[in-house]
Image (cartoon, helix red, strand yellow):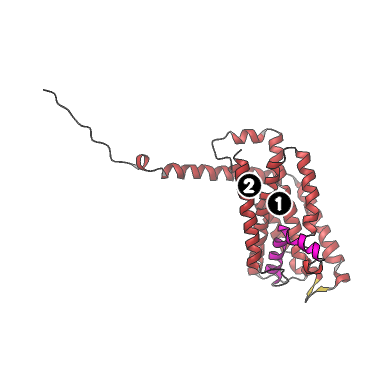
């Protein structure tokens, strides 16, 4: 007589019926990788005091020339002193110039082979650019906080709520232009070509953004160029938030434009980082 036995199937556990633990684990690994890359880039920036000093001298130059030097000549813009009007734009110049240049660290990592070592790590490739964006945004946001502390010297009263909101505006701008800088670094392979391209694009973008003069005061053809510049909306949003007026558009329109630009460049960065 043959006896047949049927083995009972084990009740489905978390490993058998769902992939949630695996997905959670992958998410934790990815977030940890982003944090490690951001920490590495932040340490590299902090350990370069010469670069930090040059950035401080640059912002001091802009303040002395535009906010102080032109204040007596221009007088006022609307109901506010010229020094107060241009101060948010001067901070935006510093934020955007440092953010968009942060993509060069990606290019140097690629040049020296560091990028190849990071890409073979068992983490999603998008973690590398996201970590660099986080580092660039964090560093520039801290610098904007320091610069905003001098607002009373420029005739800008600094209420706590406006201070926090303006820091958020500059953090958003830093994120947008850090991603733009990284996109340029993924599109342009040679470091020297990337540096030349960034330099060529930087000055028109910085000064045709309403940072030192309003688009309403410009000729029609120049105003069209300024409206096509994404930095215009970052300057406009920061100016409205800090000063409570003097805006080109409404604050929600500025946010919509910056959000659209951020979504577009993040999509491009995701496509490029997957290659």
Outermost residue to the right: 73
Dot 1, how many residues are within 10 Å of its Cα: few (below 14), some (14-19), or many (20+)?
many
Kindly identify the residue that appears in the image at 80 percent across and 66 percent down.
220
Outermost residue to the left: 1
Q: How many marks?
A: 2
Decide which of 80, 273 is in the foreground and name it.
Answer: 273
Decide which of 264, 206 is in the foreground and name it.
Answer: 264
**Residue 19 screen position, x and y as percent:** 41, 42
Decide which of 95, 213 is in the foreground and name it.
Answer: 213
Instruction: Kindly indicate the quadrant of the structure image that contains residue 61.
Output: bottom right
Q: Nearer the viewer, mark 2 or mark 1?
A: 2
Which image quarter holds the C terminus?
top right
In this rendering, the answer to whether 216 lies above or below 9 is below
Kindly identify the residue that appears in the image at 80 percent across and 48 percent down.
199
Q: Are marks 2 and 1 in contact (CB under 8 Å)?
A: no
Secondary structure beneath dot 2 equals helix
Task: Report if residue 38 is visible in the image.
Answer: no
Which image quarter holds the N terminus?
top left
Task: Report if residue 14 is visible in the image.
Answer: yes
Kindly identify the residue that appears in the image at 89 percent across and 70 percent down.
73
Residue 230: in magenta span: yes
Kindly identify the residue that appears in the image at 66 percent across and 52 percent down.
137
Q: Main secondary structure of the magenta part?
A: helix
The residue under label 2 is: 268
The residue under label 1 is: 99
Please provide the residue range marked out in magenta: 220-243
Label 2 or label 1, whichever comes before in sequence order: 1
């Amino acid at each position: 007589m043959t006896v047949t036995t049927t083995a009972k199937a084990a009740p489905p556990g978390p490993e058998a019926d769902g992939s949630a633990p695996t997905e959670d684990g992958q998410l934790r690994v990815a977030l940890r990788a982003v944090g490690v890359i951001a920490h590495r880039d932040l340490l590299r920036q902090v350990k370069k005091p010469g670069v930090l000093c040059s950035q401080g001298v640059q912002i001091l130059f802009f303040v002395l020339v535009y906010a102080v030097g032109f204040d007596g000549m221009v007088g006022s813009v609307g109901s506010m002193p010229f020094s107060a009007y241009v101060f948010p734009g001067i901070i935006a110049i510093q934020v955007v110039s440092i953010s968009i240049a942060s993509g060069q660290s990606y290019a140097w990592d690629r040049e020296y082979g560091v990028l190849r070592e990071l890409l073979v790590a068992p983490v999603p490739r998008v973690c590398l650019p996201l970590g660099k964006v986080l580092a660039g945004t964090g560093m520039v946001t801290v610098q904007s906080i320091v610069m905003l502390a001098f607002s009373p010297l420029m005739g800008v009263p600094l209420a706590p709520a406006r201070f926090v909101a303006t820091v958020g505006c500059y953090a958003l701008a830093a994120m947008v232009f850090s991603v733009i800088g990284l996109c340029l670094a993924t599109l342009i392979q040679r470091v020297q070509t990337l540096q030349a391209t960034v330099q060529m694009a930087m000055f028109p973008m910085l000064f045709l953004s309403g940072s030192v003069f309003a688009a309403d005061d410009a000729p029609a053809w120049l105003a069209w160029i300024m409206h096509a510049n994404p930095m215009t909306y970052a300057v406009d949003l920061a100016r409205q938030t800090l000063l409570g007026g003097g805006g080109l558009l409404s604050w929600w329109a500025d946010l919509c434009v910056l959000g659209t630009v951020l979504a577009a460049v993040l999509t491009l960065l995701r496509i490029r980082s997957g290659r």
